[in-house]
Image (cartoon, rainbow, N blue to C red):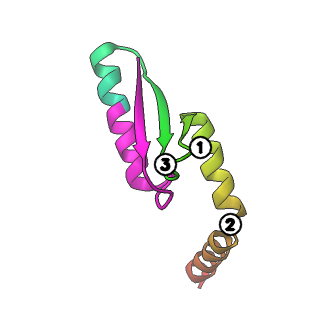
């Protein structure tokens, strides 16, 4: 059993809290109904001429790497940490 999440933009990635919650809810529902965990596939159609189909593991690697490398994300995390320390 598998299920696919279609993504039509790169504004929200798989690490966004709402996406994680929706993945977990669906995973729990399928596991409850068929007694086995589904394979999850992410279908990225942000570029319609070149859609990308990735497994959940592959999509997590791409999303994590983009967040770690993104200098805006790194600066935002530093700012949050310094505000929390004050």
Structural crowding at the residue carrying mark 3, measured as other residues with C-alpha within 10 Å and reported as few (<14), some (14–19) or many (≥20): few
Structural crowding at the residue carrying mark 1, measured as other residues with C-alpha within 10 Å and reported as few (<14), some (14–19) or many (≥20): some
Q: Residue 13 vs residue 73: left or right? A: left
Query: Label 1 vs label 3: CA separation?
Result: 21 Å
Comparing labels 1 and 3, the label whose residue is closer to the camera: 3
Residue with the mark numbered 3: 48
Residue beneath the point at 69% across and 60% down: 68
**Residue 70: assigned label:** 2
Query: Label 2 vs label 3: CA separation?
Result: 24 Å
Region in magenta:
1-26
Pinpoint residue 17: horizontal percent, then vertical percent.
Answer: 42, 54
Q: Quadrant of the C terminus?
A: bottom right
Query: Label 2 vs label 1: CA separation?
Result: 15 Å
Q: Which residue lies furthest to the bottom in this view?
A: 86
Q: Are marks 1 and 3 in contact (CB under 8 Å)?
A: no
Residue with the mark numbered 1: 60
Pinpoint residue 65: horizontal percent, then vertical percent.
Answer: 69, 53
Q: Residue 31 vs residue 67: left or right? A: left
Helix, strand or loop at label 3? It is loop
């Amino acid at each position: 059993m598998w299920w696919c999440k279609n993504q039509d933009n790169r504004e929200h990635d798989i690490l966004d809290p709402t996406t994680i919650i929706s993945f977990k809810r669906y995973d729990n529902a399928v596991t409850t109904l068929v007694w086995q965990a589904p394979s999850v596939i992410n279908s990225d159609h942000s570029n319609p001429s070149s859609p990308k189909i990735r497994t959940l593991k592959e999509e997590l690697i791409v999303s994590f790497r983009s967040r770690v490398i993104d200098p805006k994300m790194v600066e935002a995390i530093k700012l949050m940490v310094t505000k929390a320390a004050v």
